[in-house]
Image (cartoon, grey):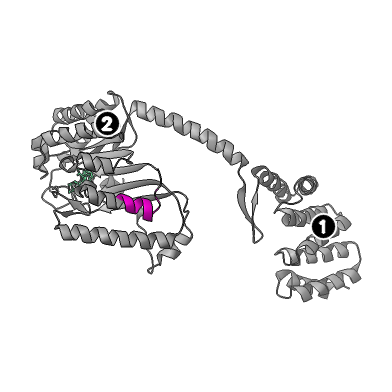
Amino acid sequence: MTSRLHQFLTRSPYQQYVYGYPHKTAYRRFESPRPLEQVWASERKEARFLYVHIPFCEMRCGFCNLFTTVNPVETVVEKFLAQLEVEAAQTADVIGPATFTRAAIGGGTPTYLDAKQLERVMTLMRETMGMGAIPLSVELSPSTVTADKLEVLSQATRLSLGVQSFVEAEVAAVKRPQANGDVTKTLDLIRARSKAHLNIDLIYGMEGQTESSFIGSLETALRWRPEELYLYPLYVRPLTFLGKRAASWDDHRVNLYRAGRDWLTSHGYVQRSMRVFQRRDVAELQRRSKDAQTGIDERIRKLEPIGVTLDDKQFLADPEEKRQYDEAFALIRKGDFAAASAGLSGFLKRYPLSGYVDSATFWLGNAQYGQRQYKEAIASFRSLLARDPAHPKAPEAMLAIANCQIELKDSRAARKTIGELVQAYPKSEAAQAGRERLASLK
Ligand SMILES: C[S@@+](CC[C@H](N)C(=O)[O-])C[C@H]1O[C@@H](n2cnc3c(N)ncnc32)[C@H](O)[C@@H]1O
Ligand code: SF4
């Protein structure tokens, strides 16, 4: 075994993981700064994700390296919100009209803000950024949730509560002061006041946590029948107080993970990823509505015009029209000129107004040339030149006419055509080839 492979297989499975927003896969290196307009110019704008980060918390948990500030003075919060509004307006302006399909408010702890401040965030998302009635996920911590904040967040379709553990000693060991009474009151409040799906975050691998205490936390969490549970292994930065642990800690986390996974999957949950578990009925409902949506999308896709770019031209084509053109063109590639000729002439009769007409005419000429039908080929190439003399294939069409004339032993006509080609498109490759042809013509 190579030493690198050996190292990889024997190192901690939880090594070098930095938990933070945006996800590490979202980062890319830019050689030089790029203006937002430029960055967005080539991006799809119809399916964007709107994310607002609130970098404030009432505590700094010992394990957390998310981007956040603890108990900032009120003026900092106000200044942050004012700046957020300015930057949202600038961003919306730069990006222009576009639609969001999902949104999230994360942190930190968004519910660290009071109801009025949260209202400002919602207004900014709706009015400045143009967020419609789309799925919205919000992160909360137990002692910051109140009924009036839930009211402001009534559009939320998913509320995610950081609990970490229902054993107070375990959360205390990771320096997260949290009273179980607050946690259960908040969960009751959320279930009473919100229709959103509930997610509960739990962590495994904390000091003093055992398999049975972890399963105990899962059991307690299920009292509120959360639609979703996130099980995080406790990630620690190397060389920190929490980071200096024995290798056996890795085994401990792996064992807890397996125990939690097995317990949840035998208690009505489906595993979605290493961390995500979804209530089985919710997963089933989502699967059915996704299947139905895929069916609708499929049917709509068959009818909706498709944007096509061909020979420097952009146009819309029916899916069937595109399919027929592509099929006939593929026959040219295969060298089956008779079938291509039939396919392209049929296409031109069926779709006389199609954006494909010029290209189809050009390739019909080629298919006819391939069958030695030189007169028909000349007619096709001439028809393209008459329709659009500026077509990118026009010089090639003229050269092809000359070639047909040579095949028909009419070198006088061929010379004349090449002369016209050189005059009309002097810089084209076809004109260059024409000049060479001319030299060899007797
Ligand atoms: C933004 S917080 C959730 C909302 C709120 N701030 C709270 O803590 O209750 C995101 C979640 O990430 C998880 N998390 C953060 N840092 C972690 C770490 N180092 N190891 C494991 N989980 C972590 C915690 O489960 C936490 O609930
Ligand atoms: S409250 Fe949440 S975001 Fe804030 S420090 Fe703790 S885990 Fe991190």
* Residue type beneath disc 1: Ser
Secondary structure mostly seen in magenta is: helix
Is label 1 in a helix, a strand or a loop?
helix
Percent across and percent down for residue 221 are 21, 30
The correct choice, above or below, for 268 with respect to 372 in the image is: above
Percent across and percent down for residue 89 are 36, 61
Query: Tags 1 and 2 in contact by the CB under 8 Å rule?
Result: no
Q: Is mark 1 within 8 Å of ligand 1?
A: no
Res. 220 image quadrant: top left
Quarter occupied by the C terminus: bottom right
The correct choice, above or below, for 345 with respect to 258 in the image is: below
Q: Whole-Å distance between the Cαs marked 1 and 2?
A: 68 Å
Q: Which residues are magenta?
A: 122-131
Using residue 213 as the reference point, say whether residue 131 is left or right of it.
right
Res. 265 image quadrant: top left
Marked residue nearer the N-terminal end (1 or 2): 2
The answer to if 127 sits in the magenta stretch is yes
* Residue type beneath disc 2: Pro
224 and 261: which is toward the camera: 224
* Disc 2: which residue: 226
| Image label count | 2
Q: Residue at x 31, y 49 (%)?
A: 122
Using residue 393 as the reference point, say whether residue 58 is left or right of it.
left
* Disc 1: which residue: 380
Quarter occupied by the N terminus: top left
Percent across and percent down for residue 11 are 23, 45
| Crowding at mark 2 (Cα within 10 Å: few <14, some 14-19, many 20+) | some
The correct choice, above or below, for 153 with respect to 401 in the image is: above
Is label 2 in a helix, a strand or a loop?
loop
**Does residue 63 appear anywhere in the picture?**
yes
**Does residue 3 appear anywhere in the picture?**
no
Q: Residue at x 58, y 41 (%)?
A: 301
